[in-house]
Image (spheres, rainbow, N blue to C red):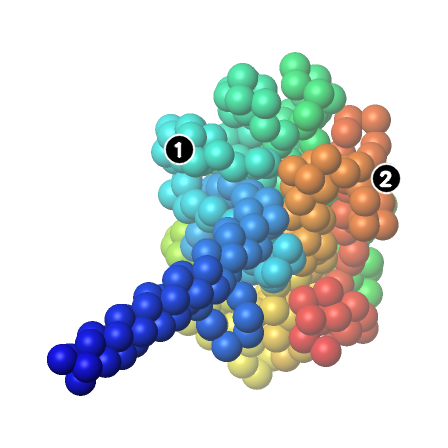
Amino acid sequence: MKKLMGLILVTILVMSTFTGCGSKQNDVEPSTGDNTSNETQTKNKDNESTSKPKIGVTIYKYDDNFMTYTRNAMTAAAEGNAELIMNDSQNNQSVQNDQVDVMINKGVQALVINLVDPGAATTIADKAKAAGIPVIFVNKEYPDGTDKIDYESTWYVGTQSKESGDIQGKLVAAAWEEHPEWDRNGDGVMQYVMLMGEPGHPDAEARTKYSIEYIENEGIKTEELEKQTGMWDATKGKELMTTWLGKEGDKIEMVLCNNDGMALGVVEALKADGYFTDDKFMPVVGVDAIPEALDLIEEGIMVGTVLNDPLNQGKSAIQMAINVATEKDVLEGIDSELDETKAVRVPYQPITKDNIKLAKRAYGME
């Protein structure tokens, strides 16, 4: 009987010991190796992700040469600083409008918009205003000026359109004076063809108009042989130049392109027609100073281009978006001022073989 009572007593003591240990274990959070609970780790991860502002971005079309570099600059600028929601608007304003609606519904804190149609700036600004979301337009500017948009939280990053035309004209005029042999027929007149960008685009209109005005103001007579839109596209540029060579032949003495993308296509058409071999040469100028064009300038194929700095445009647009999304001054961390139209202007630069390093540095190539 004593043995039985002793056994019962031992059993009771063992059970109470296990119950006590279990109670203590329930009061202590499980170890994760760094004395942080799983719940706390989850909260920390949530705080880490939400601490970075969510920025919605639309690019008018991804396969545009220049905007590809601008888009890459945006991604680099956002790394570690913001979460980007990127969209290819496929050169369709209706698609872009829908993308803006979706991003607003996703709770973005700022929008960076590379417009398909510059005239649609007010439509997108109205959407953003209704949601209380600031907007940074980039590269394509509302024709009347950003300051004319009825939403105070709207800004623009880009160039002064007229400046690109003036600089291209200055570059062409200087090269023409330096190379009298380019006047093939010796009539003292520059017979040229012009490849324009997208119809209605402020940059295309300005580059087309002011480049020729500058050349003529320098006392150089001009004659327009052909002028058509190549829609910023290399393939269309090649097609147009092939057609013009068949029609005008050696009458063409200068090729002006609103962008380097079309100039690349022009060069391909000229090469197929025997140019750039032996002494057969055709002067071609563009705008943007994309790396592919810089290579052609170094090879002596293209005469020059105009640096339209995509890296600074993309970087500035994202920094401004981060600033306004986090309620900082829009220009914090940006070495620029707003002009009277609420725009940050990234200046153009003429680029020839003599100063090509300037453009290469802008693209991070050296």
Q: Of residues 186 and 88, which is closer to you in this image? A: 88
- Foreground residue among 205 and 214: 205
Determine which residue is flagged by label 1.
102
Q: As drawn, is 250 to the left or to the right of 352?
A: left
What percent of the width, then of the height, locates residue 351? 75, 63
Q: Which residue is mark 2?
A: 337
Q: Is residue 34 above or below residue 63?
A: below
Q: Which amino acid type is marked by label 2?
A: Glu
Distance (Cα) linking label 2 and label 1: 32 Å
Q: Mark 1: which secondary structure? A: helix
Q: Which image quadrant: the N terminus?
A: bottom left
Count neighbours of disc 1 (C-alpha within 10 A) and say few if under 14, some if 14 to 19, many if 20 or more: few
Query: Looking at the picture, how far across and down is residue 263, in whole percent?
Result: 55, 59
Q: Point out the residue furthest to the top here.
A: 150
Q: Residue at x 81, y 44 (%)?
A: 332
Q: Amino acid at mark 1?
A: Val
- Residue 287 vs 105, above or below: the answer is below
Tally of marks = 2
Q: Is residue 129 visible?
A: yes
Viewer-closest of 236 and 278:
236
- Where is residue 120? Give x, y as percent: 52, 24
* Residue at (86% x, 39% y) in the render: 337
Quadrant (top left/top right/bottom left/bottom right) for the C terminus: bottom right
Residue found 77% across the figure and 26% down from its top = 341
Q: Residues within 10 Å of mark 2 (few under 14, many from 20)?
A: few
Residue ID at (65%, 38%): 325
> Which one is nearer the viewer's eye here, 65 or 99?
99
Q: Nearer the viewer, mark 2 or mark 1?
A: 1
Ranked by sequence position, the earlier of labels 2 and 1 is: 1
